Amino acid sequence: MKKKLLFISGGMALGGIERSLLGLLNALDYDKYEVDLQLFSVEGELLEFIDKRCHVLPEIPACAAMMQPVTAVLKKQPAIALKRAAAKVKVEKKYGNDDAATFALLSEYWHSCVSSMPKIKTKYDTVISFMWPHDFAAKNTTADQRIAWIHTDYTKAHMDFARDEKVWNCFDKIVGVSEDVCKTFASVYPRLADKLVVVENILPESLVRAQAEEFDPPEFDKTKKTILSVGRVSHAKGFDLAAQSAKLMRDSGEDFKWYIVGYGPEEALLRNEIERLAVGDVFVFLGKRANPYPYMKACDIYAQPSRYEGKAVTVREAQMLTKPVLITAYETAPSQVENGVDGVICPQGVENVAQALTALLNDEALCAQLRENCAKRDYSNRSFLATFEKIVSENSELFGKAMRDNTVKEKSKSFALRVIKLYKYLHDEKREFVLSKQVLRSGTSIGANIREALRGQSKPDFYSKMNIALKEADETAYWLELLHESGFINPASFKSIYADCQEIIRLLTSITKTQNQG
């Protein structure tokens, strides 16, 4: 029987996350999977390229309202509009309105509004939430297994991390698009580190190559050496800094044209910066292009001047087209480029970028070597499809296995025995009489409620007791954290017993999430 998968994402407009999703959807074996795709906005240039065997679900109006300006949805979705307006005031008061605070704003939007959205009634084997925030997939779907994707560097964010962690904790696995992305995520959410797995962006290489041949860019000045950058026009991408680098290069006598293809919230700011610097003769903002690949194919150098990234899809696409690539040394850059082999990593900063680009433009031998090395490599990352399939096949049966083998019953009993030993140690040796009683009560209550659930006379009775067991397990985790942080449990002992507690929480979460299936 085919496994039922549900992918959830924002839309299919031009963007790195969207192209990564397209690559994964089109690489799936549809003889193994029945695939639904829930887009909050069922539109975008990439929509037509999705494999026709993937069933695109109808748009949910309340979710679509999250993708539009508040003023545009005030009449159609007043509850959503008012909650978003209130969230914006709250976030700007606490965090301001810089780029890092955008994380807080999106998190607050979804936290406030998800309760006003309908639940998806179909029960799935696996739900894959491909774009953060993940509140909708965590709270409004029913599945045996949930997987959430990471595409960015959360060390650059300002938001309520404790609340966001509770959402992440609803997922059985958390997929990062590179080792470095997982590393930075774990530095922010260390308690979630054991859920992390790497699945690099699976890219539609044949589509990229085919679209690159569709036309020659009429805007390119073929008498000049050309630099290209593609991406969302936002603070993270650093196009404003690129304009400043272009000024330094021009003023030093370099003969070139630097083109920017993209769209986003800071287009007006970028245009103003180009005008302020008077660099329109060498730095040209082309705006949105439905097909950016002919521009990549025609450029001499592809540049990614970002302040921070997860793993830029555009860099991989440029490498597919054997372009010499230069990126800045954002934290996850080493997972993107092998410096000096299939690209160049230069220090961040306006002057550093200007110097590095000037050097690369004038080093034909290095450019030729970079092109040759890129031509020898496979940047589609299709090998990671096996990793994804393994996650799905191993974990989608977690609920059934837990019940058939009484896994959760046995694990909770073993955990209770560990808690009893911990209590004796705390009471007799550490002379701690308050927290030790709390952890003893909640830690032994988990297994008792599970046993009651397994003997339940009805499905509601079963789920009621399992939910109580889950609450007791979560409370036990809290007492363990306090005991560790107050010095009563050493790090090694805490890590071991806390891991057991988290495993029980995951089992119980998987079981209790099925209660709405019918």
Image (cartoon, grey):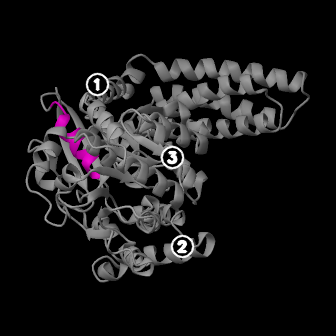
Main SS, magenta residues: helix
The residue carrying mark 1 is 386
Counting residues from the start of the chain, the first of labels 1 and 2 encountered is 2
Q: Quadrant of residue 386?
A: top left
Decide: is 479 above or below 39: above
Q: Which stretch appears magenta?
A: 18-29
**Label 1: how many residues lie within 10 Å, few (<14), some (14-19) or many (20+)?**
few
Label count reads: 3
Q: Is residue 489 left or right of residue 452?
A: right
Image location of residue 112, percent across then percent down = 47, 66
Q: Which mark is residue 97?
A: 2
Residue in view at x 9 percent, y 49 percent: 213
**In this view of the protein, can residue 129 be seen by the observer?**
no
Q: Nearer the viewer, residue 517 or 251?
A: 251
Is residue 37 shown in magenta? no
Q: Which mark is residue 329?
A: 3
Q: Nearer the viewer, residue 300 or 78?
A: 300
Q: Nearer the viewer, residue 47 or 118?
A: 47
Image location of residue 355, percent across then percent down = 48, 54
Contact? badges 1 and 2 (CB < 8 Å) = no
Name the residue type under label 1.
Answer: Ala
Image location of residue 485, percent across then percent down = 78, 38
- Label 3: which secondary element: loop
**In this view of the protein, can residue 399 be seen by the observer?**
yes
Image location of residue 100, percent across then percent down = 54, 62
Counting residues from the start of the chain, the first of labels 3 and 1 encountered is 3
- Label 2: which secondary element: loop
Is residue 20 shown in magenta? yes
Decide: is 68 above or below 34: below
